[in-house]
Image: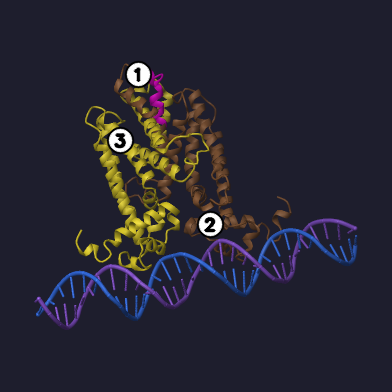
Chain colours: A brown, B yellow, C blue, D purple
Amino acid sequence: MSRRATYHHGDLRRTLLDASLALAEESGVAALSLREVARKAGVSHNAPYHHFPDKGALLAAIADEGFEALAREMTVASAAVPDGPRAPLARLEACGLAYVRYALKSRAHFRVMFRPELAQDACVTPRCSMTRPFELLVESIVACQRAGQLPDGDPMPLVLTCWSAVHGLASLWLDGPLSLDPKGFGKSPEKLAATVVGTLSSLATAAMVLPAPRARQGRDDGARRRTTRSTRE
Amino acid sequence: MSRRATYHHGDLRRTLLDASLALAEESGVAALSLREVARKAGVSHNAPYHHFPDKGALLAAIADEGFEALAREMTVASAAVPDGPRAPLARLEACGLAYVRYALKSRAHFRVMFRPELAQDACVTPRCSMTRPFELLVESIVACQRAGQLPDGDPMPLVLTCWSAVHGLASLWLDGPLSLDPKGFGKSPEKLAATVVGTLSSLATAAMVLPAPRARQGRDDGARRRTTRSTRE
DNA sequence: TGTACATCAGTGAACGCGCGTTCACTGATGTAC
DNA sequence: TGTACATCAGTGAACGCGCGTTCACTGATGTAC
């Protein structure tokens, strides 16, 4: 970091981002105001304008940071799985768990990342930063397919399903219905994440014990028809 | 509806709810203000106070309405599937598709339902209205288990996984990353929903062709170990 | 090394705005007798 | 049936508030010569 970058205050830009996150964590992203952020950073209410053209730019910077951190966590989690015949699926599971863990740990980041209306104006190619985490997911799934741990063919249906599942779990927890627990799940979010990832993984594992869905056509025609219809539609 | 309920204006309560939904649809839930709602309803800015104690109460009423409508759509979709040996799984699929379809069609409703901070003060037992849709999902899954179309045992892991998947898909679409489509999915949200539901369904179907996961232990010990760990954790 | 100047990162006052909410009111509707 | 009164659903003015943003400014830091 150049001397210029920490001019005067030390690193007001960083301080403002941290203050924003802390405030969003406390009172919700919607309640986040530039003036409050400046107050929290111990600085006059328009000092932020020397670092961000407007409020949207500050939020966009937070989102960017968040997507980078998410990709980092996924990468680290995946790399922590030792090589071996089962590694691809275990790495995919690790990515999924890392996604949920990141959302829970950095809820303010996660909320800003997926509230496009907040940073809309400032972010010319909005949400483009999701690219890297998305690529990691695709790579993990393709690796599973190559290793015969997930069905062959277009990976996108699997990508979409996995992404939806972990994103949905994180959203349901952060948005209340799960954390208020009127449903009797009664578990920590980490355990719920392990349940979802484990359920998907064990369904896939069970499905892959037979060579391929096509091989079963004679055996269970009803299932074959349904399967085809649903995935092709 | 009693005469009293439509006093004077006709049915201002209804009109206010509709105006709120229309505004939320146009400019986002966050931008929704009581004054704007009144303006849209063609009424002075404090007429709403004769129908809702405050802003939170109006939003809570919208959420309640939304959960009821969601349950209705799921019920109708499920009931439309004719009886037969494959009916339970087809009904579960229909519920999942109805969930996503509802979110897409009534995005304003959906957003208010899952933004607890908005209606927090007014809703003493917040999100309790999710109870009915949730019960429908549990019933559908238990029916599949009884019919041998999903693995036996505690239904909650499956419930959680299905709910997460459809909720996640709806959220990803409504919150941008999917609808902006930098990922090349290039499909309508209805097709994406069919893809996710179909992928889950076909994995489950493939997994159920063998009698039960336990039966495979000798055949693939690695898979057995992973499956057990992940779901139990 | 010293000096003159440019730039940079902050301050403080002020703007106009829309918000939620309160208040006293008005006129239409309903009701007791 | 008519009359007196209560209730109810709306109006319009006003409140205080925090917001995002603009402006002219100040003093610290950097730089050319």
- Report if the CB atoms under discs 1 and 3 are less than 8 Å apart: no
Nearer the observer, D3 or B5: D3
- Report if the CB atoms under discs 1 and 2 are less than 8 Å apart: no
Q: Earlier in the sequence, mark 1 or mark 2?
A: 2
Measuring 36% from the left and 29% from the top, which residue is drawn there?
Answer: A230
Determine the CA span between mark 1 and mark 3.
22 Å
Residue, disc 2: A22
Q: Eyeballing the image, is A201 above or below A24?
A: above
Dot 1 amino acid type: Arg
Q: Eyeballing the image, is A78 above or below B209?
A: below
The local crowd at label 2, few if under 14, some if 14 to 19, many if 20 or more residues have their Cα within 10 Å, is some
Looking at the picture, do discs 3 and 2 lie on one chain? no
The answer to whether one can see residue B233 in this image is no
Q: Which chain hosts label 1?
A: A
Measuring 47% from the left and 47% from the top, which residue is drawn there?
Answer: A104
Magenta region: A201-216
Which image quadrant for residue B47? Answer: bottom left
> Which of the numbered marks, if any, corresponds to residue A216?
1
SS at mark 1? helix
Q: Nearer the viewer, mark 3 or mark 2?
A: 3
> Which of the numbered marks, if any, corresponds to residue B92?
3
> Which of the numbered marks, if any, corresponds to residue A2?
none
